[in-house]
Image (tube, grey):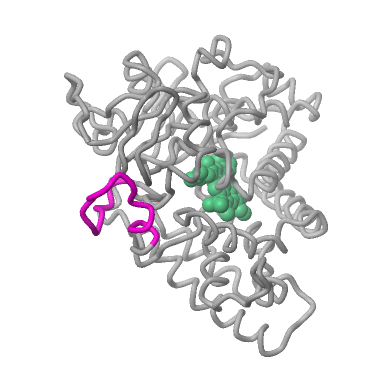
Amino acid sequence: MATATLNTDHDYFTDHAVLLDPYDYFERLRAQGPVCPMPGRDILLVTGFQESLDVLLNARDFSSWLNPDPLTPLPFVIESDDISDQLASHPSSEMELLVSYDGNRHAAARALLNPLFVPSRLKENAAFMRSYAEGMVRDIVARGGCELVGEVATPFVTMVIADLLGVPAEDREAFRALIDAAPPPGNMDAGDEGQSIHPLLAMAGYFARYVAERRAQPQDDVMTEMATATYPDGSTPDAMEVVKSAMFLFAAGQDTSAKLIGNALRRLAEDQPMQQLLRDDPSKIGPFLEEVLRIEGSTKATFRIAARDTKIGDIAVPAGQRLVVSLSAANRDPRRWENPTDFVIGRPRIKEHLAFGRGAHTCAGAQLARAEVAVLLECLLAATSAITLDEAHHGPADARRIAYEPSYIIRGLAELHLKVE
Ligand code: HEM
């Protein structure tokens, strides 16, 4: 695998300047081509929109085995131009999750989530979202402001997933506490990169009990539907597979959604005319959010490894080649998006952005994520006449202090202090 090294000392995974603000880095490398070697790494970076699609839609040649840690060493030696069997027979980590599965195994595991994402379940969940958001907004207004990311967005989205899964009311606060204690995935300052998995292990205990109870004594609830769901071939999954699917929803849908709320609110807090536009016409919240997802989606990148010798367009990619598919860069590719750094509500075909990925692994919670963020924004806008950044924390307009999470996966604010009127 020969990859030339650019003359630069920036590293995507460890350099704080890049972790905190990846966009310049992506643009600098885009100039080398839509698929180019990552400086200092034996990794290809995909920044092109079409090239990202080519990879994401080709799940046969591009395995998800590396997710969520693209630096995981291969536990075998590459000795042929097709390593698909080797990948399939070696787990990528002890805590392998849906997002790293391939092929039939992936399709079967994903089918276990089907009971959750049916319209009737999403409708019930939407009712919960609204009442929970209203309560949180009442509290924010009473206090005249909040730290949005930790105090509001994270507990809000955690409780929404707990509700979606039918976690019993008496356990929900324990779930919230576990998630609150975890750093976001890929946070390079967290010390132990795998640390974000630990709360999930703790939650696994709860889910193992729910699944065992529901299998022994089915009830009329969504947890029973999940516990008794069968694979497309009619077989019954191992209880641990059901547990892992449920836990993965927290891993996949918590930071991503909470950070999207932060990214959206920062933009609104710094753009009063835009804020007023949405307050006056809530039907614009949806299109506004799509543009936030495009220009500052909360998932910067996903990772793949070539399962066999293959190509992206005309570019040859050898078996075993690691890839960082930068969803953020694809969403700012000037060949696809006119004036990509301009924030424009109502771009044609905006929903083609890649913030939720594409193909076999496309985000299962995209509809839910859109709904929960929109509801929270709608409630906040309806209950206020102005939302502004708290300058005691973030400094004045000409000297802002805004901290992003140093993560190679997530694009989002560490904190966002708001004042509301
Ligand atoms: C703004 C919020 C969110 C963003 C930006 C986001 C983004 C993504 C992306 C980019 C992927 C694809 C990963 C890949 O191709 O390797 C993904 C997968 C996934 N997401 Fe989300 N997500 C969000 C919220 C949620 C929520 C709320 C849930 C569930 C409640 C969820 C559940 C999932 C699942 C289950 C997958 C894995 C699908 C698979 O591997 O088949 N996501 N998400």
Where does the image place residue 348, in percent across and percent down from the top left?
Answer: 70, 17
Q: Which image quadrant for residue 264?
A: top right
Q: Is residue 379 visible?
A: yes
* Residue 73 painted magenta: yes
Q: Farthest residue in the top direction? A: 339
Q: x, y (%) of residue 93?
A: 34, 62
Q: Nearer the viewer, residue 133 or 5?
A: 5
Residue 392: x %, y % from top left: 44, 31
At 27% across and 33% down in the image, what residue appears? 16
Q: Is residue 160 left or right of residue 16?
A: right
Quadrant occupied by the N terminus: top left
- Rendered view: 6 above or below 393: above
> Which residues fall within the magenta stretch?
70-88
The residue that appears at 64% across and 61% down in the rendered structure is 111
Quarter occupied by the C terminus: top right
Q: Is residue 206 above or below residue 287?
A: below
Residue at figure coordinates x 57%, y 15% from the top left: 337
| Magenta part, dominant SS | loop
